[in-house]
Image: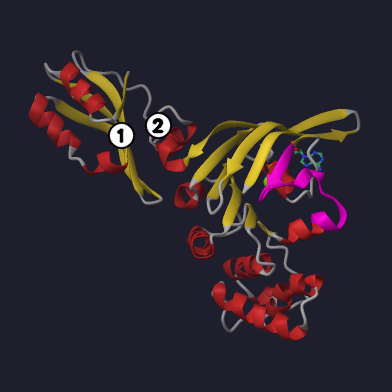
């Protein structure tokens, strides 16, 4: 639904070059929620603005729904943009317009009649859970309600793609969760493809199917979120399961990291190891997380006993990821 191929974006400030995107390639599949995770200044906003051509890449190309958007201009670009909705960190609502009037704004631009506008706005207001708020002004709304207006407005043109630039960064954790649930719900019900950028791992963990990690304009890791979290060496896994460094194994003991996802998460693995191989297991850190509909876990453990080698072999054979330190 969205592809980036070797996209580079350089800003010039005086005679200074700022490389915001440095050879970025990735692919967002139809109907998926794709996250771009990165710290401030990593190039996330530049990346998302290249999708609707608010920024033009210096080189490389971007396609949306099979169309090379980097080649479009004039009326063709405007038509394409109508199929791309966008929501923002600070909502960008018009303060002098009511909720209904804010949502109607893009419909006025497309040239809907007043009657059609009213029906569509009513439908969108109930879709985002704002029943009863049609005539309120933004100043009277909470942050979460304002973002719901932003989402309704973004959906007015019936887009195939929704872009979200840090849409929950100004919200408290509970409101963040409810807005992310709304996005997940819209994604499922309407098959809406969402490209979402964030600096928060929690957002990626809660709703993204796939992710690209952006660092100083480069994609340093990408893949399915649950696959990456299941790989101990991935940046994502290291964020989700921080390790306690500096632990030294007791004489004769072995330190190991074991990771698993999906089916493996159902096995009583520690009990099996203890019973079959007579090893003592000391858990140093770790947890099991729910990512999408998969359970993904990682544990740092200390093993003691005569049959550690056989125990580790059994873990490998049972398709656990094992790393011995
Ligand atoms: N319009 C601009 N002119 C010059 N430099 C810019 C512009 N927009 C962004 N930058 C620079 O590009 C880099 C990436 O910025 P941005 O895409 O906003 O990152 P993020 O959204 O991840 O914080 C930063 O160094 C930023 O200062
Ligand atoms: Mg930004």
How is the structure coloured here?
secondary structure
Which residue occupies the foreground of this view, 285 or 147?
Answer: 147
Above or below residue 249? Residue 112 is below
Residue 273 in which image quadrant: top left
Q: Is residue 103 left or right of residue 298?
A: right
| Residue 235 horizontal side relative to residue 305, left or right | right
Quadrant for the C terminus in the image: top left
Task: Tell me which segment is drawn in magenta.
Answer: 61-77
The residue wearing badge 1 is 285
Residue at figure coordinates x 61%, y 37% from the top left: 26
**x 81%, y 70%: residue:** 109
- The spot of residue 36 in percent (x, y) is 59, 43
- Label 1: state its secondary structure: strand
- Please determine whether, in this image, residue 65 is positioned above or below residue 59: below
Q: Which of labels 1 and 2 is toward the front?
A: 2
Reading the image, the residue beneath label 2 is: 231
Q: Can I make out residue 220 in this image?
A: yes
Residue 92: image quadrant is: bottom right
Instruction: Tell me the residue at 75%/70% (across/down).
Output: 106
Dot 2 surroundings within 10 Å: few (below 14), some, or many (20 or more)?
A: many
């Amino acid at each position: 639904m969205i592809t980036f191929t070797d996209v580079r974006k350089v800003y010039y400030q005086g005679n200074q070059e700022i490389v915001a995107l440095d050879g970025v390639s990735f692919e967002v599949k139809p109907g998926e929620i794709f996250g771009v995770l990165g710290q401030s200044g990593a190039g996330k906003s530049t990346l998302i603005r290249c999708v609707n051509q608010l920024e033009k890449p210096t080189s490389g190309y971007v396609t949306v729904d099979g169309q090379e958007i980097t080649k479009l201009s004039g009326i063709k670009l405007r038509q394409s943009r109508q199929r791309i909705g966008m929501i923002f960190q600070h909502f960008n609502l018009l303060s002098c317009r009511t909720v209904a009037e804010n949502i109607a704004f893009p419909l006025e631009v497309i040239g809907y009649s007043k009657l059609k506008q009213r029906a569509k706005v009513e439908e969108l207001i109930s879709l985002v859970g704002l029943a009863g708020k049609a005539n309120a002004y933004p100043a009277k709304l909470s942050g979460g309600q304002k973002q719901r207006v932003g989402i309704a407005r973004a959906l007015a043109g019936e887009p195939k793609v929704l872009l979200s630039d840090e849409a929950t960064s100004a919200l408290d954790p509970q409101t963040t969760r409810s807005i992310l649930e709304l996005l997940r719900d819209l994604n499922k019900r309407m098959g809406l493809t969402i490209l979402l950028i964030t600096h928060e791992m929690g957002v990626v963990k809660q709703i993204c199917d796939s992710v690209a990690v952006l660092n100083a304009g480069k994609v340093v890791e990408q893949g399915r979120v649950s696959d990456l979290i299941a790989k101990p060496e991935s940046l994502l896994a290291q964020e989700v399961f921080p390790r306690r460094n500096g632990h030294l194994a007791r004489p004769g003991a072995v330190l190991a990291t074991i990771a698993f996802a999906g089916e493996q998460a159902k096995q009583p693995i520690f009990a099996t190891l203890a019973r079959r191989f007579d090893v003592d297991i000391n858990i140093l850190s770790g947890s099991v997380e729910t990512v999408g509909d998969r359970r993904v876990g990682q544990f740092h453990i200390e093993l003691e006993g005569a049959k550690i080698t056989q125990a580790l072999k059994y873990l490998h054979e049972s398709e656990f990821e094992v790393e011995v330190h």
